[in-house]
Amino acid sequence: MPPLTIALSACALLSAGLTIWSDAKGRRRLYRPLKPLTTVLIIAVAVTATVPVPASYKTLIVAGLAFSLLGDIALVFPERWFTAGLVAFLVAQVLYIMAFKPGPGHQVSTGFFLPFLLYGLLTFFILAPGLGPLKLPVLVYIGAITIMAGFAAGRFVDQGGIRTLLAFVGAVLFLVSDSVLAYDRFGKKFGGAQIIILGTYFPAQLLIALSV
């Protein structure tokens, strides 16, 4: 791994740790700039990657991270911009799907999608009573993120290698993070939810960035 990638990854992890700490301590003035700053550092990891990968893959991952940044900014103020954040992250998931989907001559078995789709359906049925008018948008988002995880799993099994593994693990962590976020918001709030949400979200994005 190039020294610049190591340095940027270390800075991103440090910023992520400070973000989680400031959020837990209720220091909003510190948390609000730190959260998007962490994602900016993760974007820098992907942008500066020097290992040859298909140009389209890198473009899609960087674009997905950029929309995630917009989502992060929106969710700093969730009471006002939650829906905007949901849309931004939905676009990010679509971009990740386009990055992870198999190329010409390759197919992904439906078996890779089944566990993720079952997990998504279970999540939706748990959340449905509290979703109100957001029921359809949340269902669409759950469908997108589970498909993204399924493609990441299929890509890893098909191609192998450390970078596809990083993307797959990142996709699973992203799914965990969003599931906890949704349950905490629409299901039942519980202590430590934000630590789990951010503690899986930032590593998820960093691993996806490192797959470039």
Image: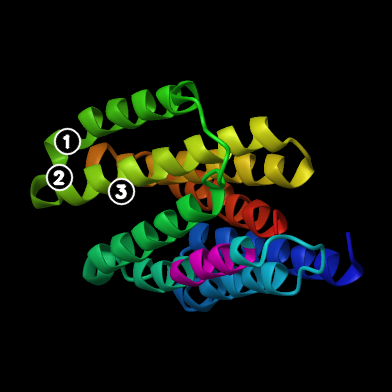
Instruction: Please report the bounds of the magenta region as a residue range.
Output: 58-67
Is residue 191 among the parts visible in the rendering? no
* Extreme-left residue of the structure: 133
User: How far is the residue under mark 1 from the one under mark 2?
Assistant: 6 Å
Is residue 205 among the parts visible in the rendering? yes
Q: Compare residues 76 and 133 and report the one nearer the observer.
A: 133
Residue 182 screen position, x and y as percent: 32, 44
Q: Are marks 2 and 3 in contact (CB under 8 Å)?
A: no
Q: Residue beneath label 3, please?
A: 141
Q: Is residue 207 above or below residue 157?
A: below
User: How far is the residue under mark 2 from the one under mark 3?
Assistant: 10 Å
Q: Residue beneath label 2, please?
A: 135
Q: Residue beneath label 1, please?
A: 128
N-term mark: 1 or 2:
1
In the image, 13: left or right of 73? right
Q: What type is the residue that disc 1 sits on? A: Ala
Residue 170 screen position, x and y as percent: 60, 45
Quarter of image, res 209: bottom right
SS under mark 2: helix
